[in-house]
Amino acid sequence: MTKRIGLILVVVLIQICASIQADEFDAPRILLFTKSAEFEHSVIKTGWLRKSSHVERILTPLIEEMGAQLESTKDGQCINENKLAETDVVIFYTSGDLTTAGNDGHPPMSQEGLDALLTWIRGGGGFIGFHSATDSFKSGGGPVTPYIEMLGGEFKTHGAQFKGTVRKVSPEHPAIASLPDRWTLQDEWYLFTHLNEAHMHVLALLEIGEERERQDIYNIPDYPIIWCRAYGEGRVLYNGLGHREDVWEHPTFKKLLREHIFWAQGRGESHAEANYQEVVPPQERALD
Ligand SMILES: [Zn+2]
């Protein structure tokens, strides 16, 4: 009898330990990479007087509040196997072919660094791309690059800024838990090519609304603007917003930042099953 009670206690203890392990995450270590081989957005610019960019100034207090750690760099050499081994979430707000020095002249990533990044994500790393992250490693008319395949879409073009509505299409998703069903804001709205329909879990669509009548290039059906996917054991999320400084300052966006980071780290349900066919019905699919 005593033996039996002992055994039950051991089983209960194992279950408790397992549940603690499943729920407990260390504070995420975040690496923000903002090299611009092509166009450099004002939100990630640093300068003589201001050593930190607008994005860093928004992220820093938020990340402190989360108990997380942030390292920010424009140095492509930082994307390497050793650095990644001590990182939980990598955030890209970049442009161009990052294996070239390009526009901003900061050291480029190596091809080994790019390969290491993709391998690291596949092995369980978290990756978040904002806005011009889809403007990096573009196919240039050739086959889809491994980076674009991973991220799930490639920047094609954009028109003048307008007030668009972000419409949530995955209501229970932990990466966008606080996003209202519909959120209208002024931003620059990217149009995409090579959307990875087979693998993406669309989180929100852009409702173009009356802008269809104003700008020809937006005279298309509503299309994905925030999405995520599983990539091997890793989690990948892309958020097309964030050209404008006031978008980064918006309380709704700040809440999303926090939720994106925790989800990319591996907290909560992955919920990354492909849903493009369900949430972007055929008659509404954007022409590629
Ligand atoms: Zn932009």
Image (cartoon, rainbow, N blue to C red):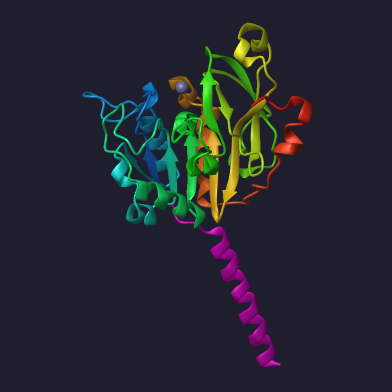
Q: Residue at x 62, y 15 (%)?
A: 218
Looking at the image, residue 180 sits to the left or right of residue 66; the answer is right
Count the marks: 0
Looking at the image, residue 177 sits to the left or right of residue 249; the answer is right
Q: Position of residue 272 (x, y in %)?
A: 64, 47
Instruction: Examine the image and state in which quarter residue 179 appears.
Output: top right
Identify which residue, 21 or 219, lies in the foreground. Answer: 219
> Farthest residue in the front direction?
142
What residue span does the magenta drawing correspond to? 1-29
Does residue 16 belong to the magenta stretch? yes
Instruction: Examine the image and state in which quarter residue 15 appears.
Output: bottom right
Does residue 6 belong to the magenta stretch? yes
Instruction: Examine the image and state in which quarter residue 17 appears.
Output: bottom right
Q: Residue at x 27, y 34 (%)?
A: 106
The chief SS type of the magenta part is helix
Q: Position of residue 200 (x, y in %)?
A: 63, 41
Identify which residue, 77 or 15, lies in the foreground. Answer: 77
Looking at the image, residue 70 sits to the left or right of residue 26; the answer is left
Q: Is residue 201 above or below residue 102?
A: below
Q: Position of residue 81 (x, y in %)?
A: 36, 55
Quarter of the figure that contains the C terminus: top right
Quarter of the figure that contains the N terminus: bottom right
Mark yes or no: residue 14 visible: yes
Q: Is residue 224 above or below residue 75?
A: above
